[in-house]
Amino acid sequence: MKKIILALVAVFCLTAVQQAQAQAYPQYYKLSHPNEISASYGVSLLGSMIGSVVSKADLIGRMAGDDDYTSIKSGGTKGVLNLGYTYQINKWFSVGATAGINRMSVNLEDKTGTLTAAAANIYTLMGTTKFDWFRTRSDIFGMYSKVGLGVMAMHGELVEDDQAKGTLWLPTGHLSLVGLEVGRAFSGFMELGVGMQGIVQVGIRGRF
């Protein structure tokens, strides 16, 4: 009789442990679909700063009251287009890579028309690591942080001077302090952070 009771207790304990493990480590949808591709648009801090400086310079020039004044305008875009891939290692960590492009230019405008005086394309390539802080059991909503390190190629030119152009290579990085994601197979996300992907970034992801 004692053996039967001990056996029942052992079975009960084993079942309780398995249930506790199941509660602690639920099988998320994304663990069975570890591959993820994403596309996003981020507001570039660098582009915003250049746009602000150009706008102030144009305002100062206009205040001078010169009728023949040539306006200075910020062209291109203040945003960064990003494409990324990640692979889910476990319920907490993902690793991957991302590529981005940002184009900026400075335009001169007078009574005769508009001329692009200088332009630059900025290309980035980074390896990334993402840490999931939590996800709901339905895997519909989650919060995460992300860090990326890599290289940046800045190709710029002065349009009227064929000699004044070239490519500058620099190290670069990005840190998304807070990321919010809604969805499963297809999801939308928003990230707040600092770096070359944008201080505010919104996009979509597909998981397979």
Image (tube, rainbow, N blue to C red):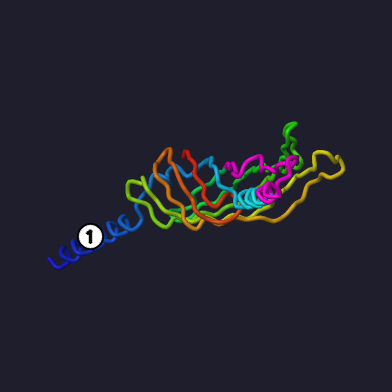
| Depth check, front residue: 93 or 178 | 178
| Depth check, front residue: 85 or 155 | 155
Residue visible at 55% across and 42% down?
41
Residue most extreme to the left? 1
Residue most extreme to the bottom? 2
Residue range corresponding to the magenta coloring: 58-83
Residue visible at 61% across and 44% down?
78
Is 64 rendered above or below residue 24?
Answer: above
Q: Is residue 72 magenta?
A: yes
Quarter of the image for the N terminus: give it.
Answer: bottom left
Q: How far across and down, in percent of the image, does residue 131 sit?
A: 48, 56
Query: Which element carries disc 1, helix, strand or loop?
Result: helix
Q: How far across and down, in percent of the image, does residue 32 sit?
A: 42, 44
Q: How far across and down, in percent of the image, does residue 106 sit?
A: 71, 43
Horizontal arrangement in the rendering, residue 164 relative to residue 15 (left or right)? right
Horizontal arrangement in the rendering, residue 176 relative to residue 7 (left or right)? right
Q: How far across and down, in percent of the image, does residue 90 sit?
A: 46, 53
Is 112 rendered above or below residue 25?
Answer: above
In the picture, residue 85 is in which quadrant? Answer: top right
Q: Badge 1: few (under 14), some or many (20 or more) residues near its Cα, within 10 Å?
A: few
Q: Is residue 32 magenta?
A: no
Residue most extreme to the top? 112
Q: Which residue is mark 1?
A: 11
Horizontal arrangement in the rendering, residue 64 relative to residue 27 (left or right)? right
Q: Which residue type carries mark 1?
A: Val
Residue visible at 27% across and 57% down?
19
| Number of on-image labels | 1
Horizontal arrangement in the rendering, residue 152 relative to residue 36 (left or right)? right
